[in-house]
Image (cartoon, rainbow, N blue to C red):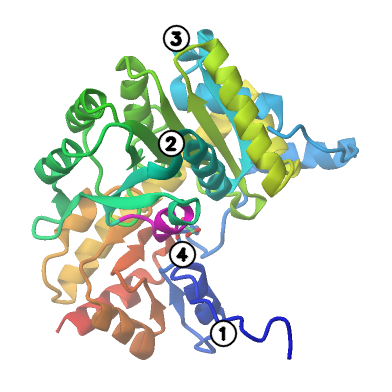
């Protein structure tokens, strides 16, 4: 009898598993609106010119590949802090932010979850928006957290249920971790505005909850600073401790390089140093230290004034194209006689919670080889002028 005979088949991942099904689909004109990947007008994952420049310089330099420190490349961590908090942030001057390069945003989440579990102990609880990115639940459950939910999305208005959100947060026990999406909420594309963020932060502070911000799409909605509003308001709020995880997968189009970071904010320099020691201890037990290449690319761009300007232009181009695709989809849907999808234009980032039912999503896949998540989430960043009309006419057909 095999040692592994009792191993059960785990369910496929709802997002990356769908990509596996998509890849295996022999249809000639298949379209993947499932996974969150930005593709350009030609349907390709772009290689940014700013990134390419650093890549070429690295290739010419032929650098040895020793281990990075456990917490990664120092320049990458410094530049990440500056991008998240603003270079002039008093938090940085006070040394209150402990940052470690991680293997994408997912490892940042997992490492943070493990460190927070050590601090919170047996009663660790995390409140997650309803709905949220599916991996949030799995990561925190696996780390031993009890999962709670707060109201977020209002299906009737396709907008934010701010009253429900504030009410639910104000009932949380002190010490509960509250997971927030900084911008471009995944999966809904619905974000609080600055005034609503302030209301949320006031409740977090009053209830002594621990803010935990996930920022995977900085620059994909309004711009680098505007998309960091939640983080900037938290930094100014007087809240002493919070957590930020971020990813450069989308903003640098470096998905496979797995470039992310974890920043834990303590009340003073000494606390931040102790937090960093715990982060490093945790990383060492999972993957020892992060990899070199992606971080060198990001640090190379962010560390050069000229390349950073070029990157901001390229990022702005992706942002503009997404806005155009949103407008184009709404217009084409109307032209095909679909019900009103105007709300797609007020949603932010790569995703739109389309309101399509699971049955309609399955019809899209089976009859039109168009892939979306069962929740109705579609990746509008995967649309282009060539596939827009096909997608709109298929959605109109399944709505009939
Ligand atoms: C997504 O939500 O599609 C992306 O964040 C990719 C992923 O890892 O799930």
Label 3 sits on a secondary structure element that is helix
Magenta span covers which residues? 132-139
> Is residue 69 part of the magenta span, yes or no?
no
> Which of the two marks, 3 or 1, is nearer to us in this view?
3
In three-dimensional space, the C-alpha distance between marks 1 and 4, rounded to whole angstroms, equals 15 Å
Of marks 2 and 1, the one in the foreground: 2
Marks 3 & 2, CB-CB < 8 Å contact: no
Most common SS among magenta residues: helix
Q: Indicate the quadrant containing the N terminus: top left, top right, bottom left or bottom right.
A: bottom right
**Could you tell me which secondary element the residue under label 4 belongs to?**
loop
Q: Where is residue 167 in the image (x, y as percent from the top left)?
A: 12, 40
Does the residue tagged 4 have its C-beta within 8 Å of any atom of ligand 1? yes
Quick one: 237 or 158, which is closer to the camera? 237
Q: Residue at x 54, y 35 (%)?
A: 262
Q: Residue 90 carries which label?
A: 3
First of labels 1, 4 by sequence position? 1
Horizontal side of residue 67 vs 130, given as left or right: right
Q: Are marks 4 and 2 in contact (CB under 8 Å)?
A: no
Looking at this view, is 58 or 230 the one in front?
230
Label 2 neighbourhood size at 10 Å, few (<14), some (14-19), many (20+)?
A: some
Q: Report whether residue 192 is seen.
A: yes
């Amino acid at each position: 009898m095999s040692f592994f005979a009792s191993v059960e088949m785990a369910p496929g991942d709802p997002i990356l598993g769908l990509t596996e099904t998509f890849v295996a689909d022999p249809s000639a004109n298949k379209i993947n609106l499932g996974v969150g990947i930005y593709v350009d007008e030609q349907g390709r994952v772009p290689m940014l010119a700013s990134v390419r420049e650093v890549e070429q310089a690295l290739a010419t330099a032929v650098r040895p590949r020793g281990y990075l420190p456990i917490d990664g490349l120092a320049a990458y961590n410094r530049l990440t802090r500056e991008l998240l908090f603003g270079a002039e942030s008093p938090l940085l001057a006070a040394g209150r932010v402990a940052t470690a390069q991680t293997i994408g945003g997912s490892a940042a989440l997992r490492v943070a979850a493990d460190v927070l579990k050590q601090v919170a102990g047996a009663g660790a609880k995390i409140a997650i928006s309803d709905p949220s990115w599916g991996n949030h639940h799995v990561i925190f459950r696996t780390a031993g957290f009890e999962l709670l939910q707060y109201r977020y999305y209002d299906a009737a208005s396709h907008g934010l249920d701010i009253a429900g959100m504030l009410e639910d947060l104000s009932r949380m026990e002190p010490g509960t971790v509250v997971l927030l999406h900084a911008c471009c909420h995944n999966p809904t594309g619905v974000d609080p505005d600055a005034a609503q963020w302030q209301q949320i932060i006031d409740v977090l502070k009053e209830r002594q909850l621990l803010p935990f911000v996930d920022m995977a799409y900085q620059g994909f909605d309004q711009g680098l600073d505007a998309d960091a509003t939640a983080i900037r308001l938290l930094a100014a709020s007087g809240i002493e401790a919070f957590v930020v995880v971020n990813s450069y997968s989308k903003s640098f189009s470096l998905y496979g390089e797995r470039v992310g970071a974890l920043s834990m904010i303590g009340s003073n320099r000494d606390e931040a140093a102790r937090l960093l020691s715990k982060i490093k201890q945790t990383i060492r037990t999972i993957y020892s230290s992060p990899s070199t290449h992606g971080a060198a690319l990001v640090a190379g761009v962010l560390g050069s004034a000229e390349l950073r300007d070029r990157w901001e232009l390229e990022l702005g181009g992706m942002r503009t194209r997404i806005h155009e695709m949103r407008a184009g989809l709404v217009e084409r849907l109307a032209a095909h006689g679909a019900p009103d999808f105007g709300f797609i234009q007020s949603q932010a980032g790569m995703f739109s919670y389309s309101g399509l039912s699971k049955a309609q999503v399955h019809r899209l896949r089976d009859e039109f080889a168009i892939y979306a998540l069962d929740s109705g989430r579609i990746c509008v960043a995967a649309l282009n002028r060539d596939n827009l009309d096909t997608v709109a006419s298929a959605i109109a057909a399944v709505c009939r």
